[in-house]
């Protein structure tokens, strides 16, 4: 496989280049990375870089042909059924971009042990010029909803600039435990991620993990890698005291931002095994347990995305409730057509 160009996603902003490679290509050795960077084979926006460089949203990272089999770059045979299944998820498409309704459980990108993901299937969908579609942003594997994809690197770069300049408005829906007070508010916190290394270092830096997976933590402004994060939220409906339906508008785009923010205010998203209560762990406080009739899946939906279209006009796409959230809405009598107060929240 020849050299490839990747666009830095919103939640990768501020990440060191070496950590970006570790996330995207987890089997690439550090020694080999240092070698190709030193030789100038890795370029960011066309310029030579160091591994300690911090990336910004929308930047283009050129990756040379690699000797190792890295999950993010590995070629594999994509079955026609996989391409058809991905196309069945399209909510909107034109000559420049497409918007998918990402289902729960489908990974956006590859990782350690992850072979089936959207980015891999997109490699089998080149345009008439042979360019493969490019991810513009990411969603967690457990999150459902709107996912934007550019059909060319040029459009990806333009969309990356739109995200970087915060012209894109994103609205998420979530079912959370309990009823937040006040019913509408602003969450402003610094978040940091651990380095995923030895256990004692993780404890010392405050990083918490479940099943070996990294968990974001609330940080001080002076902490290493601390990034400011802001989310507006509003209760749309509630079933006190068990749960509430929240609408959320993230102003920044940090890793796990909404999940960490929901936990930070004491109302984690239902079905979140990393940041929320799990079945059988809340006997002393039954209101912290997940209501039994609700499926044990993350109750978080990337509901709506609104942004300027690179060709002019406005792109405004809404995703329907995934089946597991529709089941919960039906169970508690929530109406998805109800007025969403977050629409009027600040940009």
Image: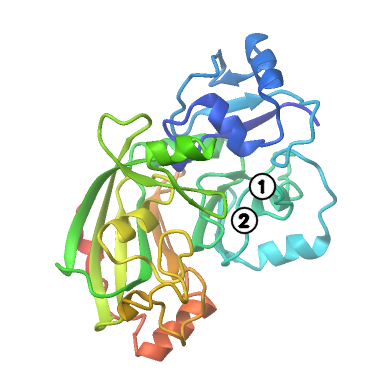
How packed mark 1 is, by other alpha carbons closer than 10 Å (few <14, some 14-19, many 20 or more), is many
Q: Quadrant of residue 152?
A: top right
Residue 185 seen by the camera:
yes
**Left or right of 134 on screen, residue 276:** left
Residue linked to disc 2 = 107
**Left or right of 188 on screen, residue 32:** right
Q: Residue at x 53, y 62 (%)?
A: 142
Q: Nearer the viewer, residue 165 or 108?
A: 108
Q: How many marks?
A: 2
Q: Residue at x 83, y 47 (%)?
A: 76
For residue 110, the mark is 1
What is the x, y in percent for residue 29?
A: 70, 26
Distance between the Cα atoms at labels 1 and 2? 7 Å
Q: Nearer the viewer, residue 213 or 150?
A: 213
For residue 177, the mark is none
Q: Is residue 39 above or below residue 300?
A: above
Q: Secondary structure at mark 1?
A: loop
Q: Secondary structure at mark 2?
A: loop
Q: Is residue 208 above or below residue 291?
A: above
Residue 162 seen by the camera:
no
Q: Is residue 13 above or below residue 255?
A: above
Q: Residue at x 35, y 65 (%)?
A: 268
**Left or right of 340 on screen, residue 259:** right
Residue lying at the far left in this picture: please name it: 182
Verify CB contact (< 8 Å) between mark 1 and mark 2: yes
Q: Residue at x 58, y 27 (%)?
A: 61
Residue lying at the far top in this picture: please name it: 39
Quarter holding the N terminus?
top right
- How is colour applied across the structure in the image? rainbow
How packed mark 2 is, by other alpha carbons closer than 10 Å (few <14, some 14-19, many 20 or more), is many
What is the x, y in percent for residue 248?
A: 31, 61
What is the x, y in percent for residue 210?
A: 51, 55
């Amino acid at each position: 496989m020849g050299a490839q160009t990747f666009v830095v996603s919103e939640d990768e902003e501020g990440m060191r280049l070496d950590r970006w490679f570790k996330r995207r290509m987890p089997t690439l050795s550090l020694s080999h990375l240092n070698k190709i960077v030193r030789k100038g084979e890795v370029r960011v926006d066309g310029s030579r870089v160091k591994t300690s460089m911090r990336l910004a949203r929308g930047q283009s990272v050129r990756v040379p042909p690699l000797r190792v089999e890295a999950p993010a770059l590995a070629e594999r045979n994509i079955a026609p059924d996989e391409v058809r299944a991905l196309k069945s998820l399209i909510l909107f498409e034109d000559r420049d971009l497409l918007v998918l309704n990402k289902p729960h459980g489908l990974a956006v990108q590859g990782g350690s042990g992850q072979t089936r993901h959207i980015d891999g299937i997109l490699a089998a969908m080149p345009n008439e010029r042979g360019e493969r579609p490019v991810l513009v942003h990411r969603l967690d594997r457990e999150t459902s909803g709107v996912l934007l994809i550019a059909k060319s690197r040029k459009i990806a770069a333009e969309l990356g600039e739109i995200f970087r300049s915060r012209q894109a408005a994103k609205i998420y829906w979530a079912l959370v435990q309990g009823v937040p007070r006040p019913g509408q508010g602003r969450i402003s916190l610094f978040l940091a991620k651990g380095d995923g290394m030895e256990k004692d270092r993780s404890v010392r830096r405050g990083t918490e993990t479940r099943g070996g997976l990294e968990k974001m933590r609330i940080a001080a402004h002076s902490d290493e890698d601390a990034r400011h994060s802001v989310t507006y939220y509003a209760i749309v409906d509630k079933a006190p005291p068990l749960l509430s339906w929240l609408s959320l508008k993230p102003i920044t785009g940090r890793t796990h931002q909404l999940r960490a923010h929901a936990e930070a205010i004491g109302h984690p998203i239902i079905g979140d095994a990393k940041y929320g209560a799990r079945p059988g762990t809340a006997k002393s406080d039954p209101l912290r347990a997940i209501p039994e009739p609700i499926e044990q899946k993350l109750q978080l939906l990337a509901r709506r995305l609104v942004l300027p279209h690179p060709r002019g006009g406005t792109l405004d796409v809404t995703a329907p409730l995934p089946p597991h959230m529709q089941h919960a809405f039906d169970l508690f009598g929530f109406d998805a057509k109800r007025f969403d107060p977050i629409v009027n929240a600040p940009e």
